[in-house]
Amino acid sequence: GDSVTQMEGPVTLSEEAFLTINCTYTATGYPSLFWYVQYPGEGLQLLLKATKADDKGSNKGFEATYRKETTSFHLEKGSVQVSDSAVYFCALTPRGNTPLVFGKGTRLSVIA
Amino acid sequence: GAVVSQHPSWVICKSGTSVKIECRSLDFQATTMFWYRQFPKQSLMLMATSNEGSKATYEQGVEKDKFLINHASLTLSTLTVTSAHPEDSSFYICSARDLDRAIGELFFGEGSRLTVL
């Protein structure tokens, strides 16, 4: 079945450091890929998405590129802030109205 | 933008009682809603797919008699945790997709934190 594997945390970075959270997937066909973020005590929010190979999703300084050849969708940010501290989930969905398949989440803590 | 709202956002109940959680799509119609459960420091586990006007589809290992799902209208799905026990304490999140808009994106409710004493 479809699955998502993302790097385990927690990840602790200093402010303005470079962030990479790795995500790889296994799926049949051509899924859509997402990064969701969950801030402390809150629900999930869509951070960015990509729906086809070589698409780059970007939002709030975060970027991720849909790499079909490596089945990856790594999340990057050039300079993290304390306010970026949250849990980040990589997810995929096949075409159609199907539920998301989530990775286990990566907790990021950014210290000043 | 599309919004999914859950109520209540948190609830504390005694063991043996039942708790109902509502999930509403506020500005779009959702023929399908998804219910997830999140344990502390863990990922989201899909519990069931709620289908408007028909029975929900439960994932393997989820007790359908324990977690009753009703999707009576195109904007409302409810999850009832029956005879709740402390092990049912968790964060329950519903989600829905606006099929007329963003491809693939799921909109999530704020979540409902259930604590069973």
Image: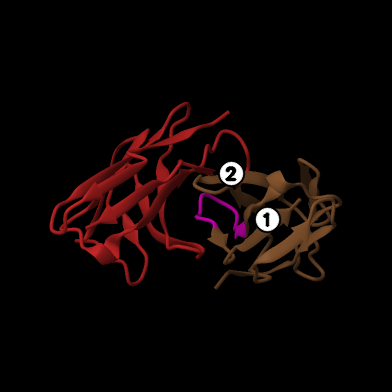
Say if residue B46 shows up in the picture.
Answer: yes
User: Which amino acid type is shown beneath numbered disc 2?
Assistant: Gln
* Quadrant holding the C terminus of chain B: bottom left
Q: Is residue A74 left or right of residue B10?
A: right
Q: How dense is the environment of label 1, judged by Cα within 10 Å: few (below 14), some, or many (20 and up)?
A: many
The answer for how far apart the CA atoms under marks 2 and 1 are is 14 Å
Callout 1 amino acid:
Leu
Tell me the quadrant of the picture where the N terminus of chain B can be found.
Answer: top right
Q: Position of residue A65 (x, y in %)?
A: 81, 56
Residue B28 drawn above or below residue A48: above
Helix, strand or loop: magenta stretch: loop
Q: Nearer the viewer, residue B117 or B92?
A: B117
Residue at position x 21%, y 63% from top?
B85
- For the colour brown, the matching chain is A
Q: Which chain is red?
A: B
- Which numbered circle lies on residue B98? none
Ranked by sequence position, the earlier of labels 2 and 1 is 1
Residue under circle 1? A33
Identify the residue position indicated by label 2 in the image.
Answer: A45
